[in-house]
Structures are given as structure tokens and as C-alpha cells.
Amino acid sequence: MPFIRESVVTTLNADGSAHIAPLGVIERPPFLVLAPFAPSTTLANLRRHPFACVAYTTEARLFAGCVTGRRRDWPVLPAERIRGWRLRDCLAHAEVEVEAVEEDAQRPRFLCRELHEAVHAPFRGLNRAQAAVLEGAILV
């Protein structure tokens, strides 16, 4: 059974800005699999520029803001090994490159190789409120 990491994925928009979206990243060793729904900005960005940053965070407001559309201007920093952006305030991030695509009309799967990983802060667990917001975002 695949393991899914609830994450925030940053892809590169055509104008060079960051697109930030919550996404369950599937661990399928040796790959991290990104499976955005069609149509979506994340999908279009990955097809145009096959790189992304996967951020691991416990910031519930980020998931809620992305899902509701109330906030999408989260601070980012330049990625370290790829052309793109990563979340500034995350516990850790991985920079990935698409190696293959499993096509699907509704939800193609991008098999990504991890190029770089960095830890920025310790994980101290989720509290119940954070976990509830995350579950709500997944349901939406």
C-alpha cells in the first residue's frame, strides 16, 4: 500500500512566480509521485517545467488558505538545486525532477526523483485542530 505524505507542492508558473498547492505526495520508492487533477495549474506547470518543491509543514492555515482561495501569497525562497521556489516557513523540503509520466485523463502521475532534501525545523507533531484542518482540506 502506498504511503501518502500530505504536503504542499510549489511549481513554477510561466511568468516565473511560484504556484503553491496542497497535494498528497505518494511514496513509491525510488520515486515521489505527484498526481495533480486535470485541469489544474500544478498539472500545467509540471508539463511545462518538470521540476517542483515538496514542502512538509504543520501550518494548518496554509492548507486552509490554499483550499479556500483566501490566501495564496505564502512567503517563498529560491530553491537550492532547481529553478523554482520553496516555501520559506516549512519544516523540510525536497526538490524533485520528473523522470516519467503515467498518463491518465483525470489524474496523471508524475514519477519524480528527489534531487535535494533539506530539514529546516523539528517536527513536534500535530495538535487536534491542525489535524482537523488537514482532514477538511483533503475532503475538499
Image (cartoon, helix red, strand yellow):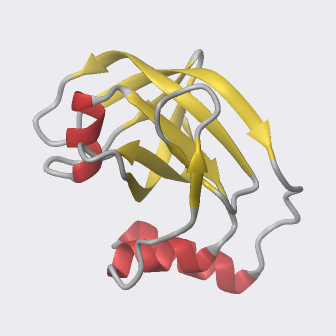
User: For residue 45, which quarter of the picture?
Assistant: top left
Q: Position of residue 128 (x, y in %)?
A: 72, 82
In the image, is residue 117 above or below residue 66? above
In the image shown, does 131 or 90 lie closer to the viewer? Answer: 90
Q: Quadrant of the C terminus?
A: bottom left
The N terminus appears in which quarter of the rendering? top right
Instruction: Please indicate whether residue 79 sits to the left or right of residue 103 in the image.
Output: right
> Left or right: where does residue 20 sit relative to residue 92?
left
Q: Residue at x 47, y 79 (%)?
A: 64
* Residue found 55% across the figure and 53% down from its top: 7
- Among the 4 quarters of the image, the one containing residue 20: bottom left
Where is 116 relative to 68, above or below?
above
Residue 105 in sight in this render: yes
**Looking at this rendering, what residue extends furthest in the front direction?**
15
Seen from the viewer's position, the closer of residues 23 and 87 is 87
- Residue 129's x, y, as percent? 67, 86
Residue 91 quadrant: bottom right
Residue 136 in view of the camera: no
Position in image of residue 39 (x %, y %): 13, 50
In the displayed structure, would residue 56 be above or below residue 128? above
Using residue 81 as the reference point, say whether residue 136 is left or right of it: left
Residue name at image x 34 percent, y 45 percent: 16
